[in-house]
Amino acid sequence: MPAIGLGTFGSDHVSAEEIAEAVKGAAAVGYRHFDCASVYGNEDRIGAAVREIMAGGVRREELWIASKLWNDKHGEDDVIASCRKSLADLQMDYLDAYFVHWPFPNYHPPHCDVGSRSPNAKPYIHANFMRTWRKMEELVDLGLARHIGTSNMTIPKLELLLRDARIKPAVNEMELHPHFQQPELFAYVRANGIEPIGYCPVGSPNRPERDRTPQDTVDIEDPVIVKIAERLGVHPAVVCIKWAAQRGQTPIPLSTKRRNYEANLRGVLSGPLTDEEMREIAGIDRNCRLIKGQVFLWKQGQTWEDLWDLDGVIET
Ligand SMILES: NC(=O)c1ccc[n+]([C@@H]2O[C@H](COP(=O)([O-])OP(=O)(O)OC[C@H]3O[C@@H](n4cnc5c(N)ncnc54)[C@H](OP(=O)(O)O)[C@@H]3O)[C@@H](O)[C@H]2O)c1
């Protein structure tokens, strides 16, 4: 898996066309890893972009293309069909990685308010998740996905999955940035041979208002990050990306600006941060989760913390 990927979630501020342009531009400067998902609503445009990239001489086996099963497709009859739909949109016959996007089958309409709750929402039910996972394993057997993975998981949920899986997750996509380092989960996945992929690696500075709370902190304004950026003469975002790659996770920053995605790639390929800088960044963790997942809650009166099993027990 290439050590940096391009995120492709435009949310409601970047169009599918702009994302597809960024995919082409990023491939031209050297990116080979693209983090996609059916719910991002742009896989058909990305497919057309990848076709152009390959027409320009890049071979399929040089690329790492990931996609994700959305929450409304956890049903046994839906998993393989959903993967095939992503493959058709992306115009390819296999994925390098296919993730279960969230461990809950709880669906919500795109762009809905954080207060919105689905009446059919359920807690994590391991037997149901395993039925979904069996179909994920079948995708590997069928050659449709080279690797399968999880996203937005917790240690208690991963423990059950690792106990029961025939094919274990090869990758786990999780929120990771200097102000949200998740040291226990990060260490757990690595100890279990699962590669951590870090989303929102820059701290998602342009996320929509509905995903912001007054407690959220800003990684790229942290004095430690800013000081290192000044030493290197780069944007603080690049320091976040360098830290991520050097720590051992694979960052997947989104950028639609060539200057920025090129700087991020160069950041991963250029000389390392010093040990002292790595120690300083380790010290600025604020445990500040940005993607809280409120819309996936299943009971009235719950808070988002219930999605993340903070006391080590799966919430029901
Ligand atoms: N598995 C999941 O549940 C999950 C959840 C969230 C996200 N993701 C994935 O993770 C990807 C990244 O997350 P994200 O987009 O929320 O957050 P992010 O990558 O932390 O931040 C993206 C923002 O940072 C800016 N940026 C990036 N590089 C920069 C640079 N060098 N200088 C200045 N600004 C820079 C970009 O603006 P410009 O475009 O102006 O450069 C962009 O708006 C998503 O696209 C998606 O693929 C997965």
Image (cartoon, grey):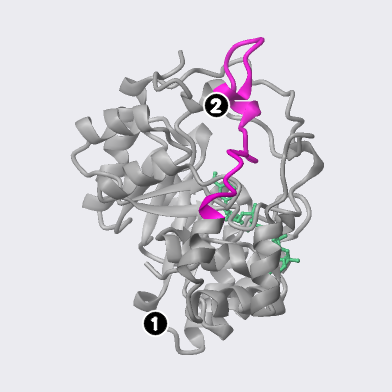
Picture residue at 59% right of the left edge, 29% below the top: 107
Picture residue at 48% right of the left edge, 68% below the top: 4
Q: Is residue 117 magenta?
A: no
Q: Residues within 10 Å of mark 2 (few under 14, many from 20)?
A: many
Q: Is residue 282 magenta?
A: yes
Is residue 255 visible in this depiction of the protein?
A: no
User: In front: 79, or 224?
Assistant: 224
Residue at the far front: name it.
276
Ligand 1 appears in which quadrant? Answer: bottom right
Q: Quadrant of the C terminus?
A: top left
Q: Which residue is mark 1?
A: 59
Q: Residues within 10 Å of mark 1 (few under 14, many from 20)?
A: few
Give the residue type that dot 1 points to.
Arg
SS type, badge 2 = loop
Picture residue at 73% right of the left edge, 29% below the top: 114
Bounds of the magenta segment = 281-305
User: In front: 176, or 89?
Assistant: 176
Picture residue at 59% right of the left edge, 49% below the top: 284
